[in-house]
Image (cartoon, rainbow, N blue to C red):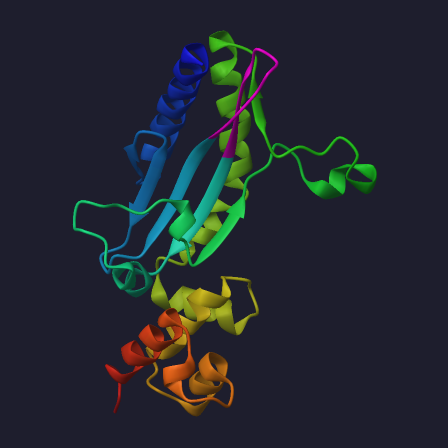
Amino acid sequence: MIVARAVLGTCARLLGERLAALGFEADGAVFRRYNPGGDVVIVDLQPHRSFLGDTQFLVNLAFLLDPAWRHYGFPPEKRPDTSHGTWWERVNPTDWEDHDDGEGFVEQWVVAGEADCATVVERLFARLGERLPVVLDWLDRDRLRQAVAEGTPVGYATELWLMAEDGPSDRLRAELFDSGPPEDGSDVDRAIWAYAHRFSR
């Protein structure tokens, strides 16, 4: 366990050095890049238990809109991780499509030992490079709205919070509450609806 933590720490440090060049700030095994409005792209390394004597971890990538984060009501010192994202996906060593019927597909990144950290991080950074340019574009609101208009999956929650910035429209109300009253909606739905009223014209 101690060895695994040390290996994961080395991988996090090496990845952090790479991500720093893209504007990310390291916080242990969590890496964040914010825009001036508080929206953030997050990468984190999630430990995965192994009984094989190696070190395994999962890699998560997320996008989080600032109003969604503020809705959680965490204290100021709390910072988000990928579990809070309004959009989220896992960055795997290979794609499902690369395997017949998924045979041999795994989500975990496996590091045999400290000496292999640099090689694994090199592969990991290359895989992240396939997605990060797209997701980092979403830190620009105009490009995010364009992505939604083009049908790019940005997360349903992202779309709802973004739609709220156009005001409390009939379409947004239908998406949030169907045909029921707002008071019957979830806490998040009501928060989005209240946020929309801040943009009433």
What residue is rendered at 55% in x and 70% in y? 150
Q: Is residue 171 magenta?
A: no
Mark yes or no: residue 21 visible. no
- First to last magenta residue range: 47-58
Q: Residue 12: where, in percent of width, then height?
A: 39, 25
In terms of depth relative to the viewer, which is nearer, 59 or 74?
Answer: 74
In terms of depth relative to the viewer, which is nearer, 66 or 75?
Answer: 75
Which image quadrant is residue 143 in?
A: bottom left
Q: Residue 76: where, in percent of width, then height?
A: 16, 50
What residue is rendered at 39% in x and 89% in y? 169
Residue 72 higher or lower than 192, as above or below: above
Q: Is residue 52 magenta?
A: yes
Which image quadrant is residue 190 in?
A: bottom left
Residue 164 higher or lower than 32, as above or below: below
Residue 128 higher or lower than 141, as above or below: above
Left or right of 91 on screen, residue 44? left
